[in-house]
Image (cartoon, rainbow, N blue to C red):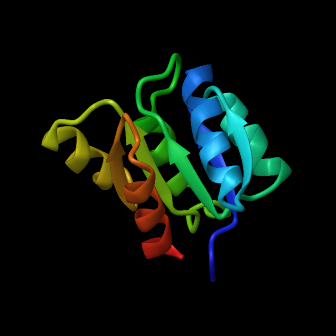
Amino acid sequence: MAIKKVLIVDDSKTELMFLTELLTKNGYLVRTAENADEAFKRLTEEKPELILMDVVMPGQNGFQLTRSINRTPEYADIPIIICTSKNLETDRVWGMRQGAKDYITKPVDAAELFSKIKALG
């Protein structure tokens, strides 16, 4: 099934605007959250088919939030792509261990992002 509904979790307004514009121009329905609490609120309002997750955020970071979502039975099936400026191999490995399906570094390359989304769909 092709992915259409995406939740972007990022505390940077610039990043949210960039990713929202990129995805909506390509036919995706986008919702956003700026922290863990907002992300869970969005999940209860409407379940997305994909989550793009930043790592460095106030409060719960993206690794912790990815783990929380994966441990919540009703959301465990939502694929998460970590989307972060943290580009060390250890970060990538840790992100995947928390349950992320993929990992992409900022600045986001549109072609790379869409190929990763397609691979999940």
Query: Where's the C terminus, which quadrant?
Result: bottom right
Kindly identify the residue that appears in the image at 43 percent across and 74 percent down. 119
Residue 115 appears at what percent x and percent y? 42, 67
Q: Is residue 59 among the parts visible in the rendering?
A: yes
Total marks placed: 0
Kindly identify the residue that appears in the image at 50 percent across and 42 percent down. 53
Asked if residue 84 is positioned above or below residue 115 in the image, the reply reads: above
Asked if residue 110 is positioned above or below residue 17 in the image, the reply reads: below
Q: Nearer the viewer, residue 110 or 97?
A: 110
Q: Residue furthest right?
A: 45
Question: Image check: 34 left or right of 112?
Answer: right
Question: Residue 32's quadrant in the figure?
Answer: top right
Residue 6 appears at what percent x and percent y? 66, 54
Q: Is residue 100 among the parts visible in the rendering?
A: no
Q: Residue furthest bottom?
A: 1
Question: Residue 56's quadrant in the figure?
Answer: top left
Q: Residue furthest top?
A: 58
Question: Image check: 18 left or right of 54?
Answer: right
Question: Image check: 28 left or right of 18?
Answer: right
Kindly identify the residue that appears in the image at 53 percent across and 19 percent down. 59
Kindly identify the residue that appears in the image at 30 percent across and 54 percent down. 96
Question: Image check: 88 left or right of 70?
Answer: left
Residue 93 appears at what percent x and percent y? 21, 49
Residue 27 appears at what percent x and percent y? 71, 62
Q: Nearer the viewer, residue 49 or 61?
A: 49
Q: Residue furthest left?
A: 89
Asked if residue 47 is positioned above or below residue 77 in the image, the reply reads: above
Query: Where's the N terminus, which quadrant?
Result: bottom right
